[in-house]
Image (cartoon, rainbow, N blue to C red):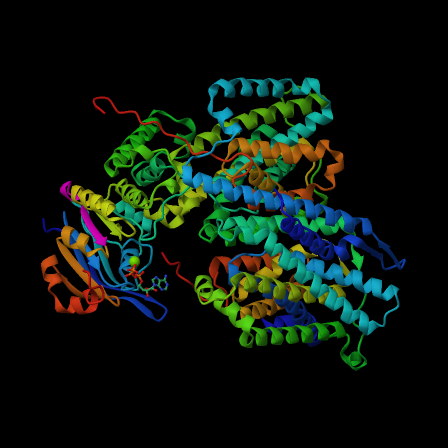
């Protein structure tokens, strides 16, 4: 249970004069659900971007250990290489392929696990056809898990907001990640949708999926996570179990103090 | 329908356009003879025309707004007649058969001149389909597409001139060279943002043309290369008429091959990656798609078709010079893609046929050809960005695999 | 390097090339300002901007000829033709934005660019059909000054007028942007359009004003270069447009001092390259420079590199 799969040390990111991340440490163990919380602008999304290769961090190390393989330093890798290594993410501001169908969106996630290329596409030989069939099959299974199979052939842009968020998760799952990064998956969802999301994340966890999630919904965070990291102004200010975080005065001051309802 | 207030606004618009176009449309001066011609009738045409167009524009936007509201409330995806026709095999196959029959008998029904015109149109169909991969599917605005066309044409002209290589030897070679150029050019420029990419490709296209114009030792400069042989047919001696007919059939085959290949590419793993890249580059990369590689394949495949048609172009006209490869040529091909519908094969075919054949047959229009191309590009973007025939996403059927109960 | 240059033509030739570079550079800068201002505010490469400049040149040609046929004095012709060009070019700029760009403000990024390319082709052919495809001899609007006589073989009066006019236009523009209400609104809009809207700036008006000012500057450039080169036709906007765009990118697109700097760098490069290397490849130098900058320093000399926010 406690083999680390993601280890981040001294991570730093500067934008001109702004230090969006400052000496940040974080780790995720296999099978764990870890939450990253903090006030708006704390640098949580920037952390995801640095870890997944979308930004190149100005300092520190990101080390990924896929199960059964040696550790890999991710710094400087491109986002697609990170995804290939087995870490996939969703986006805070939904970034679906709007003009593609729901099923196709998930099929895109299968891209890095399939091989057919120009010749395969033109000749459509047996290997390509099998691969394509398998892509459709696996993608459809994922849609079923997300409860979106009814909309398989609708355009992604026609989905409701909550469904779009779930589709993002499905698309990321299609890349067969061993670590899934979710950036505010419950944002904009109504209570019922949030409840379904919690069920979904729980299901994934039971299947052995490790998850690192950013979320502002404290109920969800407290209910799901094994451990919580709290950050403010790019720094880590606390780490611990939900229980510890709930009672941590530093956190209450910096974060919970702002939103009385949490 | 149109209220008084609306027509008043349209009248104001028309007044504004009369003012706007006054110096250019109305006055014509001759500085040497010192004469002025006042063409007041033009002012009337402009005023009248802009009034009518403004009313049409208003009605259009009104209807579009209504339709969007309706669509939002009912959540239906609308399909127009053409799409229904295409979806149903019952209509599609007879239609395709009729077209095919017409294409086959065409040379026997029409004059040599008409065959030539049709061959040109078919060449633009293939060029349009090639550029469609790059612009329509992958979303890379390539304004220097004509450069690859030039590579193909010059490959044939030069390899034939220096080494006596035949059409059939150069055809694959020209395609390959164009693809190679596509990779060489694409490698550095494809990481640029969309609009910069457009300008860089434009600049590259112009550089290649200018080099061809000035490097006399290599390309024989502006005077070009003449006496390029037409394609041979198994060593037979063809008369001019036969050669033209032969070329026509060659182009028909090319078009069929292109449609086949482009269609398969679009509905493949690679084709999906292109579309995803067009929709959202960052999400695409985060899902594990190699941006550079995927863009490069689109760019090179597009270039391949330009190279192929370039070789055929040189063989068809038997004479090439740099003037055939200006930016306007790229713009025409782009207009075809934009008019037809980005990403839609049938649309591009239709676009090429309309834009190339219409000005040929309506002689009165041919002076206004480029004016119309420009106007079409603007109005398509504003009124119908999806083109004449919008590309409909494929519906995948899910079949449970063996041994599974659903 | 410099020594080699000086050998092949002497000091005087060098100075001549230098001033001809400054002259070209001024014109490029004037047109580049329009590109940079529009790009700074709506992020669009206004492909039709070169055509605005061409229309400015044609308008001044037409008006100047009409006035001279009616026997107006030279000074009046210069002033009136200049005003006419600025007014009509601005009107075209304003109209183009409303027709071809405004409806596409929320469309995918390439849509307005394609629309702009279409507009550029349309305007070229509009002038071609309504006027002529021939080159027209542009009247020499600016008479030679007597005090320039001793140096006239190196720096012509037109060069001087062009450089001075450009300097004045830049100065005016700087004042406008720094101190007027509309200037402040323009700066705010270019930094963050949504924010600008929230604090009550009429963004539509700001965008229209940007097009109007940029077009007027291009028109001034149009008259100046036409009277410098002595001939115009419907196609001059294309090359000039690309070169001015090169200047804008060279300086850092979106940056106003950048456009001016870029204009001068490009003008001087071209002048020396054609003067010392070869004039056959005049346009290739500009295009080549454009490609090199975009590949190696797309943020330009004075622009800043942004990391796209995700
Ligand atoms: N590309 C960028 N360029 C400049 N500054 C940036 C960039 N990306 C993020 N920042 C800055 O970094 C800081 C952290 O932003 P980030 O989006 O990571 O916050 P967050 O914790 O995700 O906030 P939220 O809860 O609102 O999503 C902010 O001040 C933001 O403005
Ligand atoms: Mg965030």
Residue with the most extreme front position: B4
Range of residues picked out in magenta: A205-214
Q: Nearer the viewer, residue B120 or A19?
A: A19
Q: Nearer the viewer, residue A18 or A41?
A: A41
Residue C197 falls inside the magenta stretch? no
Q: In the image, is A148 to the left or to the right of C151?
A: left
Q: Which of the image's four quarters has the N terminus of chain B?
A: top right
Q: Nearer the viewer, residue B94 or B101?
A: B94
Residue at the location (12% across, 66% down)? A248
C157 shown above or below B195: below
Residue at the location (10% across, 61% down)? A244
Q: In the image, is B245 to the left or to the right of B290?
A: right
Residue B79 percent location from the top left of the image: 48, 31
Q: Which of the image's four quarters has the C terminus of chain B?
A: top left
Residue C66 percent location from the top left of the image: 84, 62
Q: In the image, is C272 to the left or to the right of A175?
A: right
Q: Is residue C137 visible?
A: yes
Q: Nearer the viewer, residue A87 or C123?
A: C123
To which quarter of the image does residue B276 belong?
Answer: top left
Ligand 1 quadrant in view:
bottom left
Q: Is residue B145 visible?
A: no
Residue A213 falls inside the magenta stretch? yes
Residue A223 percent location from the top left of the image: 14, 51
A73 shown above or below B84: below
Residue A25 percent location from the top left of the image: 19, 62
Residue with the most extreme right position: B33
Q: In the image, is A184 to the left or to the right of A95?
A: left
Residue at the location (73% across, 61% down)? C57
């Amino acid at each position: 249970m406690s083999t680390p799969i993601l280890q981040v040390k001294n991570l730093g990111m500067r934008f001109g004069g702004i230090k969006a991340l400052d000496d940040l440490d974080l780790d995720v163990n296999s099978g764990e659900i870890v939450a990253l919380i903090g006030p708006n602008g704390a640098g949580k999304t920037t952390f995801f971007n640095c870890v997944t290769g979308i930004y190149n961090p100005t300092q520190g190390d990101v080390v990924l250990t896929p199960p059964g393989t040696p550790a890999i330093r991710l710094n400087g890798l491109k986002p697609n290489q990170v995804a290939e290594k087995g870490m996939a993410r969703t986006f805070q501001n939904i970034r679906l392929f709007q003009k593609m169908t729901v099923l196709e969106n998930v099929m895109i996630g299968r891209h890095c696990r399939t091989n057919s290329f120009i010749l395969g596409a033109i000749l459509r030989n047996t290997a390509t056809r099998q691969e394509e069939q398998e892509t459709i099959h696996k993608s459809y299974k994922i849609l079923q898990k997300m409860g979106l199979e009814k909309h398989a052939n609708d355009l992604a842009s026609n989905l409701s907001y909550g469904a779009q968020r779930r589709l993002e998760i499905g698309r990321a799952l299609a890349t067969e990640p061993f670590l899934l990064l979710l950036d505010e998956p419950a944002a904009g969802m109504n209570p019922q949708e949030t409840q379904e999301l919690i069920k979904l994340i729980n299901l994934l966890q039971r299947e052995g999926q490790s998850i690192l999630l950013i979320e502002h919904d404290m109920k969800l965070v407290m209910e799901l996570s094994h451990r919580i990291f709290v950050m403010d102004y790019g720094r880590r200010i606390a780490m611990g179990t939900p229980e510890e975080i709930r009672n941590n005065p530093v956190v209450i001051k910096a974060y919970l103090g702002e939103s009385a309802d949490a | 329908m149109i209220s008084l207030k609306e027509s008043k606004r349209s009248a104001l618009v028309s007044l504004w356009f009369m003012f706007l176009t006054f110096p250019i449309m109305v006055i014509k001066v001759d500085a040497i003879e010192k004469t002025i011609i006042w063409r007041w009738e033009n002012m009337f045409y402009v005023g009248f025309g802009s009034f009518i167009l403004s009313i049409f524009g208003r009605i259009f936007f009104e209807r579009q707004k209504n339709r969007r509201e309706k669509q939002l409330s009912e959540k239906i995806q609308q399909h127009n007649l053409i799409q229904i026709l295409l979806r149903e095999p019952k209509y599609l196959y007879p239609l395709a058969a009729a077209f095919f029959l017409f294409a086959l008998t065409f040379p026997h029904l029409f004059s040599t001149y008409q065959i030539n015109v049709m061959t040109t149109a078919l060449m633009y169909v293939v060029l349009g389909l090639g550029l469609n991969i790059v612009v329509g599917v992958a979303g890379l605005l390539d304004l220097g597409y004509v450069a690859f066309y030039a590579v193909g044409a010059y490959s044939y002209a030069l390899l034939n001139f220096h080494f006596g290589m035949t059409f059939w030897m150069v055809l694959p070679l020209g395609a390959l060279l164009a693809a190679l150029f596509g990779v060489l050019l694409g490698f550095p420029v494809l990481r640029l943002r969309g609009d910069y990419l457009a300008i860089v490709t434009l600049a590259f296209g112009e550089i290649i043309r200018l080099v061809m114009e000035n490097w006399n030792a290599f390309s024989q400069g502006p005077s070009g290369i003449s006496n390029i042989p037409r394609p041979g047919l198994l060593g037979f001696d063809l008369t001019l008429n036969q050669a033209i007919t032969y070329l026509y059939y060659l182009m028909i085959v090319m078009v069929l091959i292109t449609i086949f290949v482009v269609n398969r590419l679009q509905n493949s793993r690679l084709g999906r990656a292109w579309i995803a890249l067009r929709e959202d580059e960052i999400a695409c990369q985060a899902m594990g798609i190699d941006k550079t590689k995927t863009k490069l394949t689109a760019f090179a495949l597009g270039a391949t078709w330009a190279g192929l048609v370039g070789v055929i172009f040189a063989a068809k006209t038997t004479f090439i010079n740099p003037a055939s490869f200006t930016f306007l040529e790229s713009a025409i091909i782009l207009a075809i893609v934009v008019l037809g519908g980005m990403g839609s094969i049938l649309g591009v075919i239709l676009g090429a046929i309309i834009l190339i054949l219409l000005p040929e047959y309506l002689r009165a229009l041919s002076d206004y050809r480029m004016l119309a191309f420009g106007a079409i590009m603007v109005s398509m973007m504003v009124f119908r960005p999806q083109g004449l025939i919008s590309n409909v996403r494929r519906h995948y059927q899910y079949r449970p695999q063996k041994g599974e109960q659903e | 390097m410099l020594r080699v240059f000086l050998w092949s033509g002497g000091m005087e030739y060098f100075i001549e090339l230098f001033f001809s570079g400054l002259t070209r550079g001024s014109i490029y800068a004037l047109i580049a300002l329009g590109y940079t201002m529009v790009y700074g505010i709506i992020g669009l490469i206004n492909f039709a901007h070169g055509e605005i400049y061409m229309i400015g040149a044609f308008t001044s040609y037409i008006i100047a000829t009409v006035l001279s046929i009616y026997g107006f004095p030279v000074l009046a012709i210069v002033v009136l033709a200049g005003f006419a060009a600025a007014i009509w070019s601005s009107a075209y700029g304003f109209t183009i934005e409303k027709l071809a760009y405004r409806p596409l403000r929320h469309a995918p990024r390439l849509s307005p660019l394609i629309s702009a390319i279409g507009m550029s082709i349309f305007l070229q052919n509009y002038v071609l059909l309504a006027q002529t495809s021939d080159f027209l001899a542009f009247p020499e609007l600016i008479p030679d000054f007597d005090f320039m006589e001793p140096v006239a073989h190196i720096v012509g009066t037109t060069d001087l007028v062009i450089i001075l006019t450009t300097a004045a236009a830049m100065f005016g523009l700087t004042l406008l942007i720094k101190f007027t209400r509309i200037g402040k609104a323009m700066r705010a809009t270019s930094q963050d359009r949504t924010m600008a809207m929230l604090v009550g700036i009429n963004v539509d008006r700001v965008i229209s004003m940007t097009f109007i000012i940029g077009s007027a500057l291009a028109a001034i450039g149009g008259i100046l270069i036409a009277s410098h080169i002595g001939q115009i036709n419907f196609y001059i906007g294309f090359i000039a447009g690309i070169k001015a765009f090169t200047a804008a990118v060279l300086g850092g697109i979106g940056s106003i001092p950048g456009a001016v700097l870029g204009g001068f760098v490009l003008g001087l490069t071209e002048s020396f390259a054609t003067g010392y290397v070869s004039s056959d490849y005049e346009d290739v130098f500009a295009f080549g420079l454009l490609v090199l900058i975009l590949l190696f320093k797309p943020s330009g000399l004075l622009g800043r590199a942004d990391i796209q926010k995700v």
